């Protein structure tokens, strides 16, 4: 039996408790090794924070205020950059719904460009695989743009070129619910297309033509299987887990994991508790968090003058109703299984930060060196880690770009 997670709003509210564990100190040798690598995360939902007027990516924010990624913490965690997501929640599968998603996505893309332009001394937009190293050598953090959920282009696939010109280099067809392109792994209504729709198959072809890396996270098994058959370029799972470790439809079964690797693709293991282990429902905690949201709004929307009161109230809830969360052991278990089945050329990690991710011992981007130390202890070499932290993803990004000529 598949285990479906709680509704998104509850997951977001419960995934990043105020009582975050401090990062484990790593050895100087580990820190030096980590700093020598190109380190990227394939799924930052940080643009959702950036869209809030009170958020400043140049300042050190905190998990307590619903933030897991900013420039100071990227520096501390040895994170060179990543894919900043244009996320659009799934709306009605209608002409009006698709157009509304289009408009929201275009504006979110503008937010990302404004962030880079306003902070051009520390950030730079990346569109090619080789940009990551060049931008890092220049002392800046690289910003790739991805699109999570294909609804913004579902009504008109020519918009894929529009978003490509905006800098988007990775796209997923679907999110929590089915849309006009594909079936979701988690739509409670079940599949409606049996995988990709006819336009979903055209979506795959157009992504290949443009050189956009295809992302099958959140897609059903049938969609992933069909994408692997249809795509001329490797496919990435930008933030997913393995089903052999935890039986959830968001996670990939071993047969498809082997097929993904055989086609040259990559799975980026995500750090999202609800997809990593059983998280029992906690009705009193859920009710308390709902009341907190009624009073203050979501963490991103709390007024600056009410922030201290919000944090105090959240701390009281966490103390009274402690959450059950996955931890670093669970994350490493997913990574090691994926490495065994797919091989070390086909794995990486994403914290799913600022989008509900974050587990005990892996709370924000400052915790990345701690994972490096765990992987060294598990037998990963420097060469393995160079692939894990960025090399594998940059390889498939480069292949998607090169193969568009064919």
Image: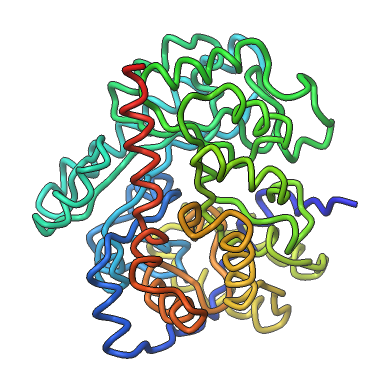
Q: Is residue 194 above or below residue 40?
A: above
The answer to whether residue 360 is seen in the rendering is yes
The quarter of the displayed image where residue 59 is located: bottom left
Residue at left 43%, top 45%? 48
Q: Is residue 365 left or right of residue 191?
A: left
Q: What residue appears at the point 70 percent right and 74 percent down from the top-left corner?
A: 323
- The residue positioned 71% from the left and 35% from the top of the image is 220
Q: List x then y, in percent, for residue 10.
A: 69, 56
Location of the C terminus (image quadrant): top left
Considering every residue shown, the one lying at the far right of the view is 1
Against 185, residue 363 (above or below) is below
In the picture shown, does residue 21 fall above or below 234?
Answer: below
On the image, the x and y values in percent for residue 115 come to: 24, 44
Q: Position of residue 216 (x, y in %)?
A: 58, 37
Q: How many numbered badges does the structure rendering display?
A: 0
In the image, residue 98 lies at what x, y percent?
Answer: 56, 16
Whether residue 92 is visible to the viewer of this picture, yes or no, is no
Residue drawn at (44%, 67%) of the image:
307
The correct choice, above or below, for 391 with respect to 288 in the image is: above
Residue 33: name its quadrant: bottom left
Instruction: From the viewer's perspective, tell me whether residue 277 is left or right of residue 94.
Output: right
Give the quarter of the image for residue 192.
top right
What kind of colouring is applied to the model shown? rainbow
- In this view, the residue farthest toward the front is 262
């Amino acid at each position: 039996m598949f285990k479906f997670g709680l509704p998104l709003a509850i997951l977001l509210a419960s995934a990043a408790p105020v009582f975050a564990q401090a990062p484990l100190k790593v050895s100087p040798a580990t820190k030096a090794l980590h700093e020598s690598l190109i380190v990227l995360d394939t799924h930052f939902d940080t643009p959702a924070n950036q869209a809030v007027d009170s958020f400043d990516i140049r300042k050190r924010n905190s998990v307590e205020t619903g933030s897991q990624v900013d420039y100071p913490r990227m520096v501390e965690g040895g994170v060179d950059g990543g894919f900043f997501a244009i996320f659009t929640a799934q709306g009605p599968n209608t002409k009006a719904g698709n157009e509304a998603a289009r408009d929201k996505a275009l504006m979110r893309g503008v937010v990302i460009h404004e962030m880079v332009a306003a902070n051009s001394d520390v950030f730079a937009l990346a569109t090619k695989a080789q940009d990551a190293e060049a931008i890092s050598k220049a002392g800046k953090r690289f910003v790739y743009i991805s699109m999570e959920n294909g609804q913004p282009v579902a009504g008109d696939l020519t918009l894929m070129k529009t978003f490509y010109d905006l800098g988007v280099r990775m796209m997923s067809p679907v999110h929590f619910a089915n849309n006009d392109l594909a079936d979701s792994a988690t739509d409670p209504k079940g599949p409606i297309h049996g995988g990709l729709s006819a336009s979903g198959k055209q979506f795959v072809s157009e992504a290949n033509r443009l050189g956009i890396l295809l992302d099958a996270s959140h897609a059903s098994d049938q969609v992933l299987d069909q994408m692997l058959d249809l795509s001329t370029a490797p496919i990435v799972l930008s933030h997913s887990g393995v089903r052999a470790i935890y039986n959830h439809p968001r996670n990939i079964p071993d047969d498809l994991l082997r097929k993904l690797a055989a086609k040259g693709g990559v799975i980026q293991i995500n750090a999202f508790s609800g997809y990593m282990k059983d998280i029992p429902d906690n009705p009193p905690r859920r009710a308390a968090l709902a009341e907190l949201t009624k009073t203050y709004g979501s963490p991103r929307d709390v007024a600056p003058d009410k922030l201290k009161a919000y944090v105090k109230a959240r701390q009281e809830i966490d103390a009274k109703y402690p959450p059950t969360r996955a931890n670093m052991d669970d994350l490493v278990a997913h990574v090691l299984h994926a490495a065994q089945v797919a091989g070390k050329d086909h794995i990486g990690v994403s914290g799913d930060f600022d989008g509900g991710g974050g587990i005990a011992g892996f709370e924000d981007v400052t915790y990345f060196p701690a994972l490096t130390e765990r992987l060294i202890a598990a037998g990963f070499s420097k060469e393995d880690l160079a692939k894990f932290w960025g090399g594998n993803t940059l390889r498939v990004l480069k292949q998607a770009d090169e193969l568009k000529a064919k």
